[in-house]
Amino acid sequence: MKLSKKLLSVLLTAVLVVSLAGCGSKTNTGDNGNNTATNENTKDTVANNGGDGSGKYEIALITDIGTIDDKSFNQGAWEGVEAYAKANNKTYKYYRPTEKSDDAYLQSIDLAIKAGAKIIVCPGFLFEVPVHTAQTKYPDVSFVILDGVPHAAEEGSAPDIAKNSYSIFYSEEEAGFLAGYAIVKEGFTKLGFMGGIAVPAVVRYGYGFIQGADYAAKELALADDAVQVQYTYVGNFDATPDNQAKAAAWYNEGTEVIFACGGAVGNSVMKAAETAGKKVIGVDVDQSSESDTVITSSMKNLSKSVSDALTSFYDNKFPGGTSVSLNASTEGVELPMDSSKFTKFTKTDYDAIYAKIVNKEITIGNDSVAKDASGVPADKVKVNVVQ
């Protein structure tokens, strides 16, 4: 029997619609660069994130322009979102802004709320002004900002945390102290600190690193100035040939280990270390999988802090209107001992120094202890500030 042209056209269209619908039901486990605030196809990265199929995502994370697999701040925060959402059957999604600007961040927040977000996690100080705007614009939505506090755009504006916002900081000086202490106990004395931009968090990491190295040197009864630290801020958070060249020069001049404290700057340092056969200390999250040169990482417990914030929100105990600084006593900072490549510094050593920090047996100055790194109190460590 012959089919009319009109009927044949209808049948072919129906087949095509069914085929396309089948393809569109799958989720994507990666980010191909199209996951931006202006693209409504922002992807959920784990199958069945949509849960009930309604297309609503009640937990959102906005990246600071990077990806959620950056092996750094975004990833650490995302892992906390993911862990809580999976354990509690919540829908969740991340949004990647089109550019690094207040307007782009606000566009991503708008998109997240249109998609049903009840609570939004914003990792990094770049969100301070956007969250300040959003907390007033969306009083029924809660915001968690990491390493920052909401404030108006005008320079010098005071912190202004609304009851629907929660600000989380970390005691980076304690995390840096742990790394400096461990690396000197491991036997290294020619150290480097390569920070990104001298924002407070980066400065605190570096100042703690110096103090930890000094404390270990005193325990080991090393001579004055026995530990040398090359110290600089490169002025960016990027992987660049210049950053790699600077790290390579330090290694060639005798530096044994560099604490790479600047986001993607670490990738440049790792490449230099691989060529030189030297070591790297990672930052923010466990970066051991990035390179065999990573001996340990000076970590903020981003995942736990985000998961804890989400727990408080869903338990109706959200600490809105407050700012906290998480430290060793709250398990806010740590070294990843299970993945660290120490041969002398043991878990027993780590637990002992960690307990001293928790019990306040050690005083660790933060970024207010000196005008620059050369003024950080230290007897056994000589800091060479490199411009």
Image: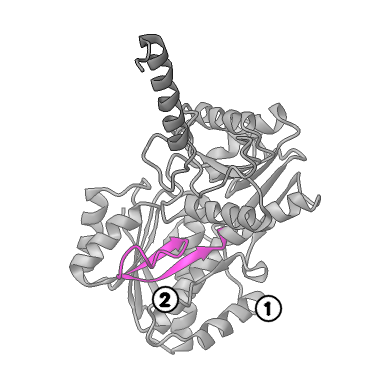
Q: Quadrant of residue 4?
A: top left
Please report the residue visible at 60 percent of the width from the left and 35 percent of the height from the top: 55
Given residues 359 and 3, the one toward you in this image is: 3
- Is any part of residue 175 visible from this angle? yes
Secondary structure found at label 2: loop
- Check disc 2 and give the amino acid type: Ser
Magenta region, residue range: 280-302
Secondary structure found at label 1: loop
112 vs 63, left or right, is: right
* Residue of label 2: 340
Given residues 245 and 167, the one toward you in this image is: 167
144 vs 30, left or right, is: right
**Against 205, is 141 above or below?**
above
* Residue of label 1: 359
Residue 30 in the image: state x and y as whole percent: 41, 46
Please report the residue visible at 50 percent of the width from the left and 42 percent of the height from the top: 63
- Is any part of residue 252 visible from this angle? no
Given residues 284 and 213, the one toward you in this image is: 284
- Check disc 1 and give the amino acid type: Asn
* Residue 211: in magenta span: no
